[in-house]
Image (cartoon, helix red, strand yellow):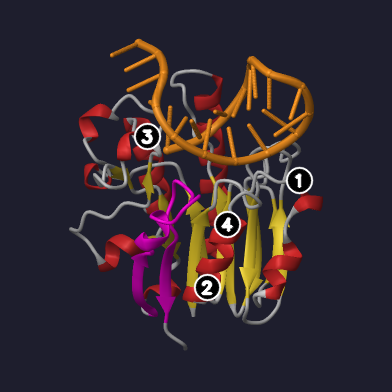
Amino acid sequence: MKIATYNVNGVNGRLPVLLRWLQEERPDVVCLQELKSPDDRFPSEAIRAVGYEALWHGQSRWNGIAILTRVGEIHETRRGLPGISDDNQSRYLEAAVNGVLIGTIYLPNGNPRPGPKFEYKMRWFEKLTEHARSLLDTGLPVVLTGDFNVMPTKLDVYKPERWVDDALFAPEVREAWFRLVDQGWTDAIRMLHPDETIYTFWKYLRNAFARNAGLRIDHFLLDPSLVGRLAGAGVDLQVRAWEKTSDHAPVWIELSDI
DNA sequence: ATGCCATCAGTTTGATGA
């Protein structure tokens, strides 16, 4: 089963790119972030026309996440994190799909740091970590994936020295990441590619993609029961070069069948 | 230190992003 995550930066503005990528790569399950669409404008018909059922949790203008599948049904298990009011920021959606519990995440950016947005990011991270603990305790196969807005190590940042005060790379944010991962999760990309420079985001500015001045902020976390099934992982870099593309590229993992 | 570019709404500039 191939599972992908893609921060589309506007699902309606990005629709041609999204549909082309779905048709060319045919991932089985897809998590989307930054829909920037209210629920009643989510393009479910266009997505269904290329073979995918969808579950979405949008809001006007900002945030928003979705889970797509072309294998079986989507059984929603949660929208919004426990302990975080989800009334005005749609950032977490969870569903059982094809025998795996999938939580998709759009973790707050947190800039500027310090400030209320950074405090919100840290609070959100804490609540995610609490919920992740409860997911591990179920013993079910679980994938947590999406835009975590954190570069875990300096290998994940072009020019790390420029990012140490930023809300995506500040020490306390990386510490929060490792508090989460050290519960027993596996960073799937790093497990298969421990030493490679791998980025998933490049600013639109200054020709950043052509210079490979990027960040690795879109991640897959696997619970222990899934680690043995991890058969591949990568980034669909070609998509980032298309016209009217997102500033993120799609990221994927392959899980072998049981 | 800032802008660099791009999304959205909706009318045109402002909030947001990373």
Query: Is A127 within the magenta?
Result: no
Q: Which x, y percent locates residue A66?
A: 65, 58
> Which mark is on residue A141?
2
Q: What residue lies at 52% left-to-right and 77% top-to-bottom?
A: A26
Q: Bounds of the magenta span? A: A229-255
Callout 2: residue from which chain?
A
Horizontal relation, residue A106 to residue A212: left or right: right
Q: What residue lies at 76% left-to-right and 38% top-to-bottom?
A: A87
Quote the CA–CA distance across marks 1 and 2: 31 Å
Callout 4: residue from which chain?
A
- Tell me where residue A211 sits by quadrant: top left
The mark that comes first in sequence, 2 or 4, is 4
Whether callout 3 and callout 1 share a subunit is answered yes
| Amino acid type assigned to the residue bearing label 2 in the image | Pro
Callout 1: residue from which chain?
A
Q: What is the number of callouts on the image? A: 4
| Amino acid type assigned to the residue bearing label 1 in the image | Pro
Query: Label 3 belongs to which residue?
Result: A205
